[in-house]
Image: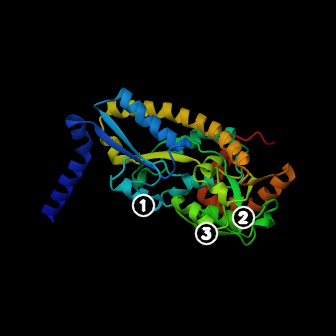
Amino acid sequence: MYKSCVAALVAALYWLSAPVMAAEGGPIVIKFAHVVADDTPKGKGALLLKQLVEERMAGKVKVEVYPNSTLVGDADEMQALFDNKVQLLAPSMSKFAPYTKKLQVFDLPFLFDDAEALQRFQKREAARQLLRSMADHGVYGLAYWNNGLKQLSATAPLRKPSDAAGLAFRIQPSPVLEAQFAAVGAKSVVLPFAKVYESLKGGVVQGAENPWSNILSQNMHSVQPYITETNHGVLDYMLITNNEFWLSMPFAVRSELEGIILEVTQAVNREAAAVNRRDRDRILASGSSQLITLTPEERQAWREQMLPVWKTYEAEIGADLIRAAMTVNRRR
């Protein structure tokens, strides 16, 4: 028993000191894995982080970027972080339900009026505290990276909530998103992001929810003849690392990295707004999909149909947190 405890302690100390040892014998290597293309807000953010670290921290830190699930896929990325096989991830907030229920606030449909409201919320103390909400699980939140509001794409035109009844939509693993589609009589299928295009093309699912940049970068519009501009939800990411890895680095190194991450985060969030406007125009110009623009009354009908989802998850998320999110809207 004594020997096993000593061995475990030695192994833990070795693992914790590994980044420091790397800094002494060479740069600390940070592997940043993600599942989207380079030409997306997240993809560009990862490359900008790599660039700025190379320019300002050469010899101390090296960032390696692995896009498009080339190192690890959707289903395995969190375990890879815990195993220290990757050191940076930027999963969507839907991926964090096993570690905290509070982040489900970002999955609630029609919670934020627009992207500006979302950004106002993310700057408030309630949202800043959420970055540390997974500390007990070893997850260290660094920043919120915006990717845009979600639109509904499908093989059929969706103007009324009842139009979605019977269709199957791809979702990320999130009970809130499952409940969202159940509220309009639709089915949900959890699929890795890398399989969405083929699943849409093959008819495994008939629809999906994504920001414009994801739709274009994965060519989803070519197999989705209709896109309804609902702006009904948020697809944002949290830049995360492993607690032990991050805190094992020298304080000065960590502080410098945090400064770069803040700068990159501001760039990512500006880029997200610009890219989604650009990609919306590109999709419409391609002629592959018909845009369905909802009237205020039609959008309100979707909102009212999905509003019971808020009540269902209020106890898990916290009524105070939902109210804090609602206060950023200009709706009266």
Q: Is residue 117 above or below residue 80?
A: above
Under tag 3, what secondary structure? helix
| Residue with the mark numbered 2 | 155
Dots 2, 3 in contact, CB < 8 A: no
Label whose residue precedes the other's in the sequence (2 or 1): 1
Label whose residue precedes the other's in the sequence (2 or 3): 2
- Cα distance, mark 3 to mark 1? 24 Å
The front one of 251 and 291 is: 291
Q: Which mark is residue 91?
A: none
As shown in the figure, which amino acid type bears the numbered disc 2? Thr
In this rendering, position of residue 14 left or right of residue 147: left
- Cα distance, mark 2 to mark 3? 12 Å
Which quadrant of the structure image shows residue 271? Answer: top right
| Residue with the mark numbered 3 | 202
Q: Residue at x 33, y 53 (%)?
A: 85
As shown in the figure, which amino acid type bears the numbered disc 3? Gly
Q: Residue at x 74, y 60 (%)?
A: 306
Q: Position of residue 317 (x, y in %)?
A: 60, 56
- Closer to the observer: label 2 or label 1? 2
The front one of 300 and 288 is: 288
The front one of 97 and 114 is: 114
The front one of 11 and 317 is: 11
Q: Residues within 10 Å of mark 2 (few under 14, many from 20)?
A: some
- Cα distance, mark 2 to mark 1? 30 Å
Residue occupying the far top of the picture: 56
Q: Residues within 10 Å of mark 1 (few under 14, many from 20)?
A: few
Q: Is residue 54 visible?
A: yes
Label whose residue precedes the other's in the sequence (3 or 1): 1
Q: Is residue 196 above or below residue 60?
A: below
Under tag 2, what secondary structure? loop
| Residue with the mark numbered 1 | 76
Q: Position of residue 15 (x, y in %)?
A: 24, 49
